[in-house]
Amino acid sequence: MTLFSPAHREFRARVRDFVTTNFTPHADEWERQGTLPRHVFTDLGKQGWLGITHEPKYGGLGLDFGYNVAFAEELPRSKMMGLTLSVIAQTNIFPPLLARLGTEEQKQQFLAAAIRGEKIGGVASSEPTGGSDIVRSVQCRAEEDGDFWVVSGEKKYITNSPIADFLIMLVRTRAEPSINSLSLLIVPTDVPGFRVKETMRKLGMHTSPTGWLELDHCRIPKRLTLGKVNLGYHYVARNILEERLIGGASAVAAADYVLHETMDYLRQRIAFDQPLSHLQAVRHRVAELAAEVEASRRFVHSVCETYRDGHVEAKEICMIKFLVFETVQRVVERCLQLHGGYGFMEENWITRVFRDVRVLSVGGGPSELMKDLVAAYLRL
Amino acid sequence: MNAPNQALSRDYVYRRVAQLLHEIVGTPLEDINEDITVDEDLQMTSVIFVELHVAIEEELDTELDPIEVVELNRLGDIVDYMYERALETRR
Protein backbone atom coordinates (compact mmCIF):
# COMPACT_ATOMS: atom_id res chain seq x y z
CA MET A 1 0.00 0.00 0.00
CA THR A 2 1.40 3.41 -0.93
CA LEU A 3 1.84 6.08 1.71
CA PHE A 4 -0.96 8.33 0.49
CA SER A 5 -4.50 7.37 -0.57
CA PRO A 6 -7.15 9.81 -1.85
CA ALA A 7 -8.22 10.21 1.80
CA HIS A 8 -4.68 11.23 2.73
CA ARG A 9 -4.64 13.77 -0.09
CA GLU A 10 -7.95 15.24 1.06
CA PHE A 11 -6.53 15.49 4.59
CA ARG A 12 -3.40 17.18 3.24
CA ALA A 13 -5.51 19.77 1.42
CA ARG A 14 -7.35 20.59 4.66
CA VAL A 15 -4.09 21.01 6.58
CA ARG A 16 -2.65 23.22 3.84
CA ASP A 17 -5.72 25.41 3.83
CA PHE A 18 -5.63 25.73 7.61
CA VAL A 19 -1.92 26.51 7.79
CA THR A 20 -1.92 29.07 4.99
CA THR A 21 -5.07 30.76 6.35
CA ASN A 22 -4.18 30.85 10.04
CA PHE A 23 -0.39 30.89 10.29
CA THR A 24 1.26 32.10 7.08
CA PRO A 25 -0.17 35.65 7.26
CA HIS A 26 1.59 36.07 10.64
CA ALA A 27 4.97 34.76 9.50
CA ASP A 28 6.76 38.10 9.12
CA GLU A 29 5.43 39.42 12.43
CA TRP A 30 6.16 36.32 14.51
CA GLU A 31 9.58 35.91 12.93
CA ARG A 32 10.46 39.54 13.64
CA GLN A 33 9.30 39.20 17.24
CA GLY A 34 10.87 35.76 17.63
CA THR A 35 7.72 34.41 19.20
CA LEU A 36 5.48 31.42 18.88
CA PRO A 37 2.04 32.12 20.35
CA ARG A 38 0.61 29.34 22.49
CA HIS A 39 -2.63 29.45 20.54
CA VAL A 40 -0.83 27.75 17.65
CA PHE A 41 -0.94 24.58 19.73
CA THR A 42 -4.54 24.93 20.87
CA ASP A 43 -5.62 25.82 17.32
CA LEU A 44 -4.02 22.63 16.00
CA GLY A 45 -5.28 20.67 19.00
CA LYS A 46 -8.86 21.62 18.21
CA GLN A 47 -8.40 20.08 14.77
CA GLY A 48 -7.10 16.87 16.39
CA TRP A 49 -3.86 17.19 14.46
CA LEU A 50 -1.55 17.01 17.47
CA GLY A 51 -2.61 13.40 17.98
CA ILE A 52 -3.03 12.05 14.47
CA THR A 53 -1.80 8.53 15.16
CA HIS A 54 -2.79 8.32 18.81
CA GLU A 55 -5.69 6.45 20.36
CA PRO A 56 -9.05 8.26 20.39
CA LYS A 57 -9.37 7.71 24.14
CA TYR A 58 -6.54 10.24 24.55
CA GLY A 59 -8.02 12.61 21.99
CA GLY A 60 -6.12 11.18 19.05
CA LEU A 61 -7.52 10.50 15.60
CA GLY A 62 -6.28 6.89 15.39
CA LEU A 63 -5.03 7.38 11.82
CA ASP A 64 -1.99 5.80 10.17
CA PHE A 65 1.49 7.29 9.95
CA GLY A 66 0.89 8.50 6.39
CA TYR A 67 -1.45 11.18 7.75
CA ASN A 68 1.28 12.25 10.16
CA VAL A 69 3.70 12.57 7.24
CA ALA A 70 1.21 14.61 5.22
CA PHE A 71 0.68 16.92 8.19
CA ALA A 72 4.41 17.43 8.73
CA GLU A 73 4.91 18.13 5.04
CA GLU A 74 2.34 20.93 5.07
CA LEU A 75 3.71 22.83 8.06
CA PRO A 76 6.48 24.60 6.05
CA ARG A 77 3.66 26.31 4.13
CA SER A 78 3.46 28.53 7.21
CA LYS A 79 6.74 30.02 5.95
CA MET A 80 8.04 29.46 9.48
CA MET A 81 10.46 26.60 9.87
CA GLY A 82 10.64 27.38 13.57
CA LEU A 83 6.91 26.86 13.94
CA THR A 84 7.29 23.68 11.91
CA LEU A 85 9.98 22.39 14.29
CA SER A 86 8.06 23.32 17.42
CA VAL A 87 4.86 21.67 16.22
CA ILE A 88 6.73 18.50 15.21
CA ALA A 89 8.27 18.52 18.69
CA GLN A 90 4.73 18.51 20.07
CA THR A 91 3.58 15.68 17.78
CA ASN A 92 6.54 13.37 17.23
CA ILE A 93 9.25 14.00 19.81
CA PHE A 94 7.74 13.35 23.24
CA PRO A 95 4.22 11.94 22.59
CA PRO A 96 5.48 8.59 21.24
CA LEU A 97 7.42 8.12 24.49
CA LEU A 98 4.31 8.76 26.56
CA ALA A 99 2.16 6.54 24.35
CA ARG A 100 4.63 3.66 24.43
CA LEU A 101 5.84 3.83 28.03
CA GLY A 102 3.34 5.88 30.01
CA THR A 103 1.03 4.63 32.73
CA GLU A 104 -2.66 5.30 32.24
CA GLU A 105 -2.40 8.18 34.72
CA GLN A 106 0.58 9.69 32.86
CA LYS A 107 -1.19 9.38 29.52
CA GLN A 108 -4.30 11.11 30.81
CA GLN A 109 -2.37 13.83 32.58
CA PHE A 110 0.23 14.61 29.91
CA LEU A 111 -0.46 12.91 26.57
CA ALA A 112 -4.15 13.81 26.38
CA ALA A 113 -3.44 17.40 27.44
CA ALA A 114 -0.66 17.68 24.84
CA ILE A 115 -2.91 16.33 22.09
CA ARG A 116 -5.47 18.99 22.98
CA GLY A 117 -2.66 21.56 22.78
CA GLU A 118 -3.32 22.64 26.34
CA LYS A 119 0.05 21.47 27.65
CA ILE A 120 3.28 21.99 25.76
CA GLY A 121 6.00 19.41 26.28
CA GLY A 122 9.45 18.47 25.15
CA VAL A 123 12.30 16.04 25.57
CA ALA A 124 15.36 17.26 27.46
CA SER A 125 18.45 15.16 26.76
CA SER A 126 21.37 17.41 25.81
CA GLU A 127 23.42 19.24 28.40
CA PRO A 128 26.18 21.85 28.37
CA THR A 129 28.56 18.88 28.41
CA GLY A 130 27.23 17.50 25.13
CA GLY A 131 24.50 15.58 23.38
CA SER A 132 25.92 13.11 20.87
CA ASP A 133 27.84 10.96 23.36
CA ILE A 134 24.74 11.00 25.48
CA VAL A 135 25.60 8.04 27.68
CA ARG A 136 28.63 9.84 29.08
CA SER A 137 27.60 13.47 28.74
CA VAL A 138 24.46 13.39 30.90
CA GLN A 139 25.37 14.72 34.33
CA CYS A 140 21.95 15.88 35.46
CA ARG A 141 21.36 13.37 38.24
CA ALA A 142 18.34 12.03 40.07
CA GLU A 143 18.76 10.61 43.54
CA GLU A 144 16.16 8.61 45.39
CA ASP A 145 14.48 10.05 48.46
CA GLY A 146 11.50 7.96 49.53
CA ASP A 147 8.71 8.38 47.00
CA PHE A 148 10.62 11.11 45.18
CA TRP A 149 13.53 11.67 42.86
CA VAL A 150 15.65 14.70 43.70
CA VAL A 151 16.93 16.11 40.42
CA SER A 152 19.79 18.57 40.01
CA GLY A 153 21.71 19.67 36.94
CA GLU A 154 21.34 21.48 33.64
CA LYS A 155 19.82 20.85 30.24
CA LYS A 156 20.67 22.87 27.15
CA TYR A 157 19.41 23.39 23.57
CA ILE A 158 15.95 22.05 24.48
CA THR A 159 13.25 22.79 21.91
CA ASN A 160 10.06 24.39 23.28
CA SER A 161 11.38 24.29 26.84
CA PRO A 162 10.94 28.04 27.55
CA ILE A 163 7.19 27.66 26.99
CA ALA A 164 6.84 24.05 28.14
CA ASP A 165 4.51 22.85 30.88
CA PHE A 166 6.46 19.63 31.31
CA LEU A 167 9.60 17.99 29.97
CA ILE A 168 10.55 14.37 29.62
CA MET A 169 14.03 14.51 31.03
CA LEU A 170 16.92 12.10 30.61
CA VAL A 171 18.69 11.92 33.96
CA ARG A 172 21.50 9.92 35.46
CA THR A 173 20.29 7.35 37.97
CA ARG A 174 23.52 5.35 38.14
CA ALA A 175 26.96 6.86 38.44
CA GLU A 176 28.65 4.49 35.97
CA PRO A 177 28.69 5.70 32.33
CA SER A 178 26.88 2.52 31.29
CA ILE A 179 24.18 2.34 28.62
CA ASN A 180 21.96 1.26 31.53
CA SER A 181 22.55 4.29 33.71
CA LEU A 182 19.99 6.86 32.51
CA SER A 183 16.28 7.15 33.21
CA LEU A 184 13.35 9.20 31.97
CA LEU A 185 11.36 11.41 34.33
CA ILE A 186 8.39 13.63 33.54
CA VAL A 187 9.30 16.99 35.05
CA PRO A 188 6.53 19.59 35.41
CA THR A 189 8.13 22.97 34.82
CA ASP A 190 6.32 24.56 37.77
CA VAL A 191 8.16 22.35 40.26
CA PRO A 192 10.21 24.35 42.80
CA GLY A 193 13.88 24.52 41.80
CA PHE A 194 13.24 24.48 38.04
CA ARG A 195 14.06 27.56 36.02
CA VAL A 196 14.72 28.56 32.44
CA LYS A 197 18.21 29.94 32.75
CA GLU A 198 18.15 31.39 29.28
CA THR A 199 15.97 31.48 26.18
CA MET A 200 18.74 31.01 23.66
CA ARG A 201 19.38 33.30 20.72
CA LYS A 202 19.99 31.36 17.53
CA LEU A 203 21.10 31.75 13.92
CA GLY A 204 17.62 30.79 12.75
CA MET A 205 14.44 28.99 13.77
CA HIS A 206 13.31 32.16 15.52
CA THR A 207 9.74 30.96 15.93
CA SER A 208 10.92 27.93 17.87
CA PRO A 209 11.95 28.71 21.45
CA THR A 210 15.07 26.93 22.69
CA GLY A 211 16.04 26.83 26.34
CA TRP A 212 18.92 26.37 28.73
CA LEU A 213 17.50 24.92 31.91
CA GLU A 214 18.61 24.60 35.50
CA LEU A 215 17.28 22.19 38.09
CA ASP A 216 18.17 22.64 41.73
CA HIS A 217 16.99 19.80 43.94
CA CYS A 218 13.67 19.45 42.12
CA ARG A 219 11.51 16.87 43.87
CA ILE A 220 9.79 14.70 41.29
CA PRO A 221 7.33 12.03 42.46
CA LYS A 222 8.42 8.54 41.45
CA ARG A 223 5.05 8.02 39.80
CA LEU A 224 6.38 10.37 37.11
CA THR A 225 9.15 7.93 36.15
CA LEU A 226 8.55 7.08 32.49
CA GLY A 227 9.25 3.45 31.64
CA LYS A 228 11.72 1.41 33.62
CA VAL A 229 14.54 2.90 35.63
CA ASN A 230 17.97 2.89 33.95
CA LEU A 231 16.63 2.17 30.45
CA GLY A 232 16.18 5.82 29.47
CA TYR A 233 18.97 5.90 26.90
CA HIS A 234 17.44 3.02 24.97
CA TYR A 235 13.98 4.58 25.00
CA VAL A 236 15.36 7.87 23.67
CA ALA A 237 17.55 6.15 21.07
CA ARG A 238 14.54 4.35 19.65
CA ASN A 239 12.25 7.36 19.87
CA ILE A 240 14.58 9.78 18.11
CA LEU A 241 14.35 7.73 14.93
CA GLU A 242 10.75 8.84 14.43
CA GLU A 243 11.76 12.44 15.04
CA ARG A 244 14.47 12.19 12.39
CA LEU A 245 12.18 10.49 9.90
CA ILE A 246 9.28 12.90 10.19
CA GLY A 247 11.78 15.77 10.22
CA GLY A 248 13.17 14.45 6.96
CA ALA A 249 9.74 14.40 5.35
CA SER A 250 9.05 17.95 6.48
CA ALA A 251 12.46 19.24 5.39
CA VAL A 252 12.11 17.79 1.89
CA ALA A 253 8.66 19.37 1.62
CA ALA A 254 10.19 22.69 2.65
CA ALA A 255 12.88 22.37 -0.03
CA ASP A 256 10.23 21.54 -2.60
CA TYR A 257 8.20 24.57 -1.57
CA VAL A 258 11.25 26.83 -1.77
CA LEU A 259 12.11 25.41 -5.20
CA HIS A 260 8.61 26.08 -6.55
CA GLU A 261 8.61 29.61 -5.17
CA THR A 262 11.98 30.08 -6.82
CA MET A 263 10.63 28.82 -10.13
CA ASP A 264 7.79 31.35 -9.90
CA TYR A 265 10.36 34.08 -9.35
CA LEU A 266 12.49 32.91 -12.27
CA ARG A 267 9.50 33.01 -14.61
CA GLN A 268 8.79 36.62 -13.68
CA ARG A 269 12.23 38.09 -13.33
CA ILE A 270 13.45 39.64 -16.59
CA ALA A 271 17.13 39.87 -17.44
CA PHE A 272 18.78 40.14 -20.83
CA ASP A 273 15.33 40.76 -22.35
CA GLN A 274 13.90 37.46 -21.22
CA PRO A 275 12.70 35.70 -18.08
CA LEU A 276 15.52 34.10 -16.11
CA SER A 277 13.71 30.79 -16.54
CA HIS A 278 14.60 30.88 -20.24
CA LEU A 279 18.34 30.89 -19.59
CA GLN A 280 19.88 27.47 -20.10
CA ALA A 281 22.20 27.69 -17.12
CA VAL A 282 19.22 28.48 -14.90
CA ARG A 283 17.06 25.75 -16.43
CA HIS A 284 19.77 23.14 -15.88
CA ARG A 285 20.31 24.22 -12.30
CA VAL A 286 16.58 24.00 -11.54
CA ALA A 287 16.40 20.57 -13.18
CA GLU A 288 19.28 19.37 -10.96
CA LEU A 289 17.59 20.70 -7.83
CA ALA A 290 14.24 19.17 -8.77
CA ALA A 291 15.93 15.81 -9.27
CA GLU A 292 17.62 16.05 -5.85
CA VAL A 293 14.34 16.91 -4.16
CA GLU A 294 12.49 14.09 -5.90
CA ALA A 295 15.16 11.50 -5.04
CA SER A 296 15.11 12.65 -1.42
CA ARG A 297 11.34 12.55 -1.22
CA ARG A 298 11.14 9.04 -2.61
CA PHE A 299 13.83 7.81 -0.23
CA VAL A 300 12.06 9.34 2.77
CA HIS A 301 8.64 8.10 1.70
CA SER A 302 9.90 4.55 1.21
CA VAL A 303 11.24 4.51 4.79
CA CYS A 304 7.98 6.10 6.03
CA GLU A 305 6.02 3.28 4.40
CA THR A 306 7.94 0.59 6.23
CA TYR A 307 7.72 2.63 9.45
CA ARG A 308 3.94 2.82 9.05
CA ASP A 309 3.93 -0.98 8.72
CA GLY A 310 5.78 -1.37 12.01
CA HIS A 311 9.34 -1.87 10.83
CA VAL A 312 11.94 0.71 11.87
CA GLU A 313 14.78 0.98 9.33
CA ALA A 314 17.29 2.54 11.69
CA LYS A 315 20.24 2.56 9.31
CA GLU A 316 18.23 4.20 6.54
CA ILE A 317 16.85 6.80 8.95
CA CYS A 318 20.41 7.73 9.94
CA MET A 319 21.21 8.02 6.23
CA ILE A 320 18.25 10.36 5.78
CA LYS A 321 19.51 12.45 8.68
CA PHE A 322 22.72 13.40 6.89
CA LEU A 323 22.11 12.72 3.19
CA VAL A 324 18.64 14.20 2.83
CA PHE A 325 19.11 17.03 5.31
CA GLU A 326 22.32 18.15 3.64
CA THR A 327 20.57 17.93 0.26
CA VAL A 328 17.85 20.21 1.58
CA GLN A 329 20.50 22.70 2.73
CA ARG A 330 22.13 22.64 -0.70
CA VAL A 331 18.82 23.08 -2.52
CA VAL A 332 17.87 26.06 -0.38
CA GLU A 333 21.31 27.66 -0.78
CA ARG A 334 21.15 27.31 -4.56
CA CYS A 335 17.60 28.65 -4.68
CA LEU A 336 18.83 31.67 -2.74
CA GLN A 337 21.57 32.13 -5.34
CA LEU A 338 18.97 32.02 -8.12
CA HIS A 339 17.24 34.99 -6.50
CA GLY A 340 20.37 37.15 -6.90
CA GLY A 341 20.54 40.13 -4.55
CA TYR A 342 16.86 39.73 -3.65
CA GLY A 343 17.76 36.38 -2.07
CA PHE A 344 19.91 38.22 0.48
CA MET A 345 17.15 40.55 1.65
CA GLU A 346 15.37 39.97 4.95
CA GLU A 347 12.02 40.67 3.26
CA ASN A 348 12.48 37.52 1.20
CA TRP A 349 11.33 34.35 2.94
CA ILE A 350 14.21 32.38 1.43
CA THR A 351 16.70 34.33 3.55
CA ARG A 352 15.02 32.96 6.67
CA VAL A 353 14.82 29.42 5.33
CA PHE A 354 18.52 29.57 4.43
CA ARG A 355 19.31 30.31 8.08
CA ASP A 356 16.71 27.89 9.45
CA VAL A 357 17.80 24.77 7.56
CA ARG A 358 21.36 25.12 8.78
CA VAL A 359 20.26 23.41 11.97
CA LEU A 360 19.19 20.26 10.14
CA SER A 361 22.67 18.76 10.04
CA VAL A 362 23.39 19.81 13.63
CA GLY A 363 20.27 19.29 15.76
CA GLY A 364 18.89 15.89 16.73
CA GLY A 365 22.25 14.25 16.10
CA PRO A 366 24.83 15.88 13.81
CA SER A 367 25.74 14.43 10.42
CA GLU A 368 29.05 13.16 11.76
CA LEU A 369 27.34 11.03 14.43
CA MET A 370 24.87 9.74 11.83
CA LYS A 371 27.75 8.61 9.62
CA ASP A 372 29.37 6.87 12.60
CA LEU A 373 26.11 5.05 13.24
CA VAL A 374 25.68 4.05 9.59
CA ALA A 375 29.25 2.72 9.60
CA ALA A 376 28.37 0.74 12.73
CA TYR A 377 25.24 -0.67 11.06
CA LEU A 378 27.43 -1.67 8.11
CA ARG A 379 29.90 -3.33 10.52
CA LEU A 380 32.68 -1.44 8.83
CA MET B 1 29.64 -13.02 9.47
CA ASN B 2 27.06 -15.61 10.42
CA ALA B 3 27.69 -19.28 9.88
CA PRO B 4 24.43 -20.75 8.53
CA ASN B 5 25.71 -24.32 8.54
CA GLN B 6 26.81 -24.16 12.15
CA ALA B 7 24.43 -26.20 14.33
CA LEU B 8 22.66 -23.81 16.66
CA SER B 9 23.15 -24.53 20.33
CA ARG B 10 23.13 -22.38 23.39
CA ASP B 11 26.84 -22.95 23.76
CA TYR B 12 27.40 -21.75 20.20
CA VAL B 13 25.41 -18.56 20.90
CA TYR B 14 27.38 -17.93 24.08
CA ARG B 15 30.73 -18.40 22.35
CA ARG B 16 29.80 -16.13 19.45
CA VAL B 17 28.47 -13.39 21.75
CA ALA B 18 31.58 -13.61 23.93
CA GLN B 19 33.79 -13.31 20.86
CA LEU B 20 31.88 -10.25 19.64
CA LEU B 21 32.07 -8.61 23.06
CA HIS B 22 35.79 -9.11 22.89
CA GLU B 23 36.17 -7.82 19.32
CA ILE B 24 33.76 -4.87 19.43
CA VAL B 25 33.59 -3.74 23.06
CA GLY B 26 37.15 -4.73 23.87
CA THR B 27 36.29 -6.87 26.90
CA PRO B 28 39.12 -9.33 27.61
CA LEU B 29 37.93 -12.89 26.90
CA GLU B 30 39.08 -14.02 30.34
CA ASP B 31 36.75 -11.46 31.95
CA ILE B 32 33.68 -12.73 30.13
CA ASN B 33 31.41 -15.19 31.93
CA GLU B 34 27.71 -15.91 32.37
CA ASP B 35 27.41 -13.62 35.38
CA ILE B 36 28.82 -10.37 34.05
CA THR B 37 26.21 -7.64 33.62
CA VAL B 38 25.56 -4.76 31.25
CA ASP B 39 25.23 -2.46 34.25
CA GLU B 40 28.51 -3.26 35.93
CA ASP B 41 30.86 -4.82 33.44
CA LEU B 42 30.06 -3.73 29.89
CA GLN B 43 30.52 -0.01 29.48
CA MET B 44 30.23 1.19 25.90
CA THR B 45 29.24 4.20 23.84
CA SER B 46 25.99 4.35 21.93
CA VAL B 47 27.81 3.76 18.63
CA ILE B 48 29.61 0.68 19.97
CA PHE B 49 26.29 -0.63 21.28
CA VAL B 50 24.73 -0.29 17.83
CA GLU B 51 27.67 -2.11 16.25
CA LEU B 52 27.45 -4.92 18.79
CA HIS B 53 23.70 -5.27 18.37
CA VAL B 54 23.91 -5.43 14.58
CA ALA B 55 26.79 -7.90 14.73
CA ILE B 56 24.91 -10.28 17.02
CA GLU B 57 21.77 -10.05 14.85
CA GLU B 58 23.85 -10.95 11.81
CA GLU B 59 25.65 -13.77 13.55
CA LEU B 60 22.42 -15.32 14.76
CA ASP B 61 20.39 -14.33 11.70
CA THR B 62 17.56 -12.99 13.85
CA GLU B 63 16.10 -9.70 15.03
CA LEU B 64 16.65 -8.72 18.65
CA ASP B 65 14.90 -6.00 20.62
CA PRO B 66 17.75 -3.99 22.19
CA ILE B 67 15.57 -2.93 25.11
CA GLU B 68 14.68 -6.54 25.92
CA VAL B 69 18.37 -7.43 25.71
CA VAL B 70 19.65 -4.76 28.09
CA GLU B 71 16.75 -5.22 30.48
CA LEU B 72 17.93 -8.77 31.12
CA ASN B 73 21.28 -7.30 32.17
CA ARG B 74 23.09 -10.58 33.07
CA LEU B 75 24.99 -12.11 30.15
CA GLY B 76 23.73 -15.63 30.83
CA ASP B 77 20.11 -14.43 30.68
CA ILE B 78 20.83 -12.40 27.55
CA VAL B 79 22.29 -15.47 25.85
CA ASP B 80 19.20 -17.50 26.82
CA TYR B 81 17.00 -14.84 25.19
CA MET B 82 19.14 -14.70 22.07
CA TYR B 83 19.16 -18.50 21.75
CA GLU B 84 15.35 -18.59 22.02
CA ARG B 85 14.99 -15.82 19.42
CA ALA B 86 17.38 -17.57 17.04
CA LEU B 87 15.46 -20.85 17.42
CA GLU B 88 12.15 -19.08 16.76
CA THR B 89 13.53 -17.52 13.59
CA ARG B 90 14.57 -20.93 12.30
CA ARG B 91 11.17 -22.57 12.99
Image: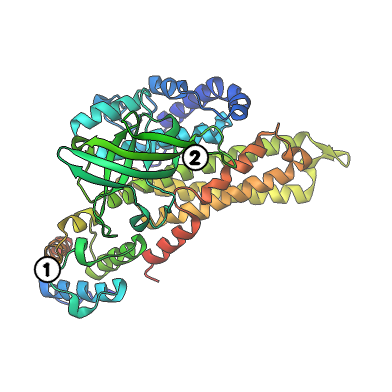
Between A214 and A101, the one nearer to me in the picture: A214
Inspect the image, locate mark 2, and give the three-letter code of the amino acid beneath it.
Ser
Give how far across and how far down residue A320 sits, in percent: 47, 52
Residue beneath disc 1: B35
Inspect the image, locate mark 1, and give the three-letter code of the amino acid beneath it.
Asp
Give how far across and how far down residue A316 sits, in percent: 41, 55
Q: In percent of the image, x 22 and y 51: which residue is there?
A: A230
Give how far across and how far down residue A46 sits, in percent: 39, 19
Are the residues at dot 2 and dot 1 in contact (C-beta closer than 8 Å)? no
Q: Which mark is residue B16?
A: none
Is B6 displayed left or right of A8 in the figure? left
Chain of the residue where label 2 is placed in the rendered structure: A
Between disc 2 and disc 1, the foreground one is 1
Position above or below: B12 against A268: below
Residue beneath disc 2: A250
Position above or below: A249 against A83: below
Q: Tell me the element at label 2.
A: helix
Is A335 displayed left or right of A303 in the figure? right
Can marks 2 and 1 be said to lie on one chain?
no
